[in-house]
């Protein structure tokens, strides 16, 4: 009789521990449920990539947006016309001429006209698309959402570094796309899928910049919602396969302002990729997606690695001063924000570090001990 309460208590303790252990084990959705959710998010993305009514409404309601869209359309139409003039007009005219003229007229046309037009188009498109994005963001979220930084010397250096990094990232994306396309059999399809994500990234980049998202946060956000962003970038990627080479870039620039506006009004899903289907039970159990379907697709791993390599090669004076070990995302993120490249003879401190490395944002001050604070380190993604 004296052992029975102890036996009952031991049995209860074992059962309680078993329940706690079972509750601590993660709960997963089935493979069918996970695939269904991914298809739902993809359909949401492709629907939001066809919201041309939002583009028309925004353009007709605001004069500044309408003006920049019209200028972009005219300039990119000129670029497309210039690209196809040689193929449709000049090349047939010199077809029966001597080999020297036929061989070199294309280079003369590209160097003297096509490349300057395309270069000017890239610069002006970047300026106009920035204005369209900022104005669309203000119209959607109000004037208080627009945080305009004061125009200072270091602010100008940061803008130049950001533009340069953006050009580097576009270049590396093109290189990766061409490399993927050279894979036997499935290379063209893999390259096309990659370009869908690249197009979606650049359409949403203005939204993320306006919300002060870092490079690591942007990449992680896209890679954890890969089905939605793949579908959103699908229409623009299809349009960009109409031509070849520079023509595809001109086609993308032609439709880019419209997709920026659609991205401003888009609502990427899911909100929480690690708990995509919240339980309605009172226990609020987290239900992870099926392990057979990846939550995060490492789309930009090679691009970020190439960016990090290029930034290290192009860094000026990187051997001076104190060296710290950096992850790949740290180096590229600092380069994009204008803090990863040290400039000679510009505000050197006693430690050899530039003010851009000492302070992450404009207006930050050094602490009383005179040491430069280490910019916000992020965990390696």
Image: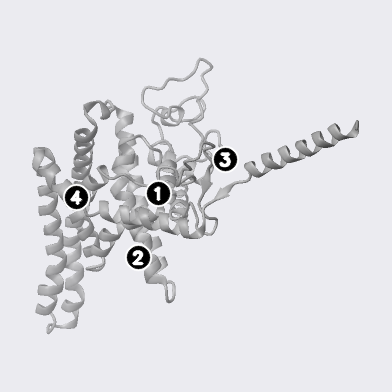
- Residue appearing at x 14%, y 70% in the figure: 86
Q: Mark 2 and mark 3 in contact (Cβ < 8 Å)? A: no
Q: Which mark is residue 325?
A: 3
Above or below for 271 versus 199: above
Q: Considering the numbered disc 3 on the image, is that residue within a helix, a strand or a loop?
A: loop
Q: Earlier in the sequence, mark 3 or mark 2?
A: 2
Q: Circle 2 is placed at which residue position?
A: 192
Frontmost residue, 186 versus 302: 186
Q: Earlier in the sequence, mark 2 or mark 4?
A: 2
Frontmost residue, 257 versus 28: 28
User: Picture coordinates of residue 76 (x, y %)?
Assistant: 15, 56
Task: Tell me the crowding category of disc 4: few under 14, some 14 to 19, or many 20 or more residues within 10 angstroms, Cα based.
Answer: many
Question: How far apart are labels 3 and 1 at the CA level?
Answer: 26 Å
Frontmost residue, 196 versus 366: 196
Q: Circle 1 is placed at which residue position?
A: 222
Asked if residue 148 can be seen in this view, the reply is: no
Q: Earlier in the sequence, mark 3 or mark 1?
A: 1
Question: How far apart are labels 3 and 2 at the CA level?
Answer: 35 Å
Q: Is residue 330 left or right of residue 114?
A: right
Name the residue furthest top: 368
Specify the quadrant that holds the N terminus: top right
Q: Considering the numbered disc 1 on the image, is that residue within a helix, a strand or a loop?
A: helix
Asked if residue 30 can be seen in this view, the reply is: yes
Q: Earlier in the sequence, mark 4 or mark 3?
A: 4
Q: Mark 4 and mark 1 in contact (Cβ < 8 Å)? A: no
Q: Which mark is residue 258?
A: 4
User: Picture coordinates of residue 322 (x, y %)?
Assistant: 55, 33
Question: How far apart are labels 1 and 4 at the CA level?
Answer: 20 Å
- Residue appearing at x 52%, y 56% in the figure: 30
Q: Considering the numbered disc 4 on the image, is that residue within a helix, a strand or a loop?
A: helix
Task: Tell me the crowding category of disc 3: few under 14, some 14 to 19, or many 20 or more residues within 10 angstroms, Cα based.
Answer: few
Frontmost residue, 170 versus 226: 226
């Amino acid at each position: 009789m004296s052992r029975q309460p102890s036996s009952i208590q031991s049995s209860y303790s074992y059962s309680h521990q078993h329940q706690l252990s079972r509750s601590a084990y993660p709960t997963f959705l089935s493979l069918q449920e996970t695939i269904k959710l991914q298809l739902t998010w993809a359909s949401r993305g492709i629907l939001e990539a066809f919201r041309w009514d939002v583009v028309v409404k925004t353009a007709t309601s605001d004069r500044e947006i309408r003006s920049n869209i019209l200028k972009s359309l005219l300039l990119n139409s000129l670029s497309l016309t210039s690209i196809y003039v040689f193929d449709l007009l000049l090349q047939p005219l010199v077809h029966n001429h001597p080999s020297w003229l036929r061989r070199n007229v294309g280079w003369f046309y590209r160097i003297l006209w096509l490349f300057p037009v395309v270069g000017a188009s890239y610069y002006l498109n970047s300026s106009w698309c920035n204005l369209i994005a900022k104005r669309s963001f203000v119209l959607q979220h109000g004037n208080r959402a627009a945080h305009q930084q004061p125009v200072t010397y270091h602010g100008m250096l940061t803008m130049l570094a950001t533009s340069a990094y953006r050009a580097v990232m576009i270049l590396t994306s093109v290189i990766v796309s061409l490399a993927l396309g050279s894979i036997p059999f499935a290379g063209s399809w893999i390259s096309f899928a990659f370009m869908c994500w690249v197009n979606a990234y650049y359409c949403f980049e203005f939204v993320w910049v306006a919300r002060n998202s870092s490079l690591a946060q942007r990449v992680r956000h896209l890679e954890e919602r890969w089905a939605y962003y793949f579908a959103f970038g699908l229409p623009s990627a299809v349009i960009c396969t109409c031509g070849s080479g520079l023509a595809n870039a001109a086609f993308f620039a032609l439709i880019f302002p419209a997709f920026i506006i659609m991205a401003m009004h888009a609502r990427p899903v899911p909100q929480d990729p690690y708990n995509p289907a919240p339980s309605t039970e009172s226990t609020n159990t987290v239900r992870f997606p099926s392990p057979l379907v990846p939550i995060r697709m490492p789309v930009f791993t090679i691009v970020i690695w190439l960016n990090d390599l290029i930034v290290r090669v192009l860094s000026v004076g990187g051997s001076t001063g104190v060296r710290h070990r950096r992850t790949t995302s740290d180096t590229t993120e600092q380069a994009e924000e204008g803090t990863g490249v040290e400039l000679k003879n510009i505000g050197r401190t006693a430690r050899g570090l530039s003010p851009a490395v000492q302070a992450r944002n404009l207006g930050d001050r050094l602490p009383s001990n005179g040491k430069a604070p280490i910019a916000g380190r992020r965990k390696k993604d």
